[in-house]
C-alpha cells in the first residue's frame, strides 16, 4: 500500500463551499472547520473591537467596519476574519477586495492557521495592517505591510496605535479591548 500524497487529496472551490453547512474557511482548496464556535472571551474581544472601530470610523465616509464576513480571495480561498476595516468597498454579500485592516482573535483551534497560513495570504493580498489578539495574555500584535512584507510594529495592551488608512487616520485604543 502506498502512502497518501497531498496531490491525492480532494480540492474544493467556491461552488462546493456554498453548499456546506456550518462555519468553514477554504484555503487553497482545503476546507478548515471553524468549530468549535468562539468562546465568550473571544466574542467579547471581537465585540469590543467592533465598538471601537464603529466609533472611530463615524467621521470617515469611505471606510466601514464589519465582523465575521466572508472574504472571497479566489475561487478556492475563502476566509472569515473576525473584524475588518473596508475602504471604498462596494456593498455586496461578501468581501471582494482586500480589507485595509484585519483583526484576528486567536483561539487554540485557529492560532496556528492565523499566525502562518492566513498571515501569508493577507500579506500576499496587500492587507495593510494585520492585528493578532491573544486573549490569554491580553495583548495585541500589530503588523504593518511595508515593502510587501509584514513588520511587527509592537505589542499593545492598553496603548494606542494610529492606523493610516489613506482615506483617513484612526487612533485606535487597545485599552478597552480586553475588558470583559
Image (tube, rainbow, N blue to C red):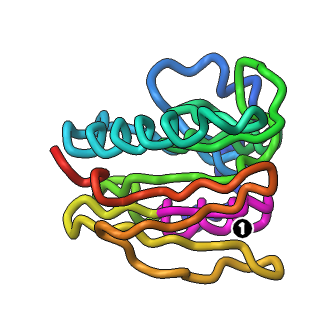
The structure residue drawn at horizontal position 43% and vertical position 66%, both measured from the top left corner, is 160
Task: Identify the residue under disc 1.
Answer: 123
Please say if 108 is above or below 148. above
Q: How many marks?
A: 1
- Residue numbers of the magenta segment: 113-131
Q: Position of residue 142 (x, y in %)?
A: 51, 71
Residue 6 vs 78, above or below: the answer is below
* Secondary structure character of the magenta stretch overall: helix
| 133 displayed left or right of 18 | left
User: Viewer-proximal residue, 52 or 59?
Assistant: 59
Quadrant location of the N terminus in the rendered image: bottom right
Which secondary structure, mark 1?
A: helix
Residue 34 showing in the rendered view:
yes
- Residue 48: image quadrant is top left
Q: Residue at 60% of width from left, 39% of height from top? A: 57
The residue that appears at 41% across and 58% down in the rendered structure is 173
Q: Is residue 1 left or right of residue 137?
A: right
Q: If the image is split into quadrants, where does the C terminus sit?
A: top left
Relative vertical location of residue 82 with respect to residue 58 in this rendering, above or below: below
Of residue 30 and residue 63, the one placed in the foreground of this image is 63
Percent x, y for residue 12? 71, 37
Residue 69 magenta: no
Q: Position of residue 104 (x, y in %)?
A: 46, 53
- Image coords of residue 105 (percent x, y): 38, 53
Amino acid at each position: 500500500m502506498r502512502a497518501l500524497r497531498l496531490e491525492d487529496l480532494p480540492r474544493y472551490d467556491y461552488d462546493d463551499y456554498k453548499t456546506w453547512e456550518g462555519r468553514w474557511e477554504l484555503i487553497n482548496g482545503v476546507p478548515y472547520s471553524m468549530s468549535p464556535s468562539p468562546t465568550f472571551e473571544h466574542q467579547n474581544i471581537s465585540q469590543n473591537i467592533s465598538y471601537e472601530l464603529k466609533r472611530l470610523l463615524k467621521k470617515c465616509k469611505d471606510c466601514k467596519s464589519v465582523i465575521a464576513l466572508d472574504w472571497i480571495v479566489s475561487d478556492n480561498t475563502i476566509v472569515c476574519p473576525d473584524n475588518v476595516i473596508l475602504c471604498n468597498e462596494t456593498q455586496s454579500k461578501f468581501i471582494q477586495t482586500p480589507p485595509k485592516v484585519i483583526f484576528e482573535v486567536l483561539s487554540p483551534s485557529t492560532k496556528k492557521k492565523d499566525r502562518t497560513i492566513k498571515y501569508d495570504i493577507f500579506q500576499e493580498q496587500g492587507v495593510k495592517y494585520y492585528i493578532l489578539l491573544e486573549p490569554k495574555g491580553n495583548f495585541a500584535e500589530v503588523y504593518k505591510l511595508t515593502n510587501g512584507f509584514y513588520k511587527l510594529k509592537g505589542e499593545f495592551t492598553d496603548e494606542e496605535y494610529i492606523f493610516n488608512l489613506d482615506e483617513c487616520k484612526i487612533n485606535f485604543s487597545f485599552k478597552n479591548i480586553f475588558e470583559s
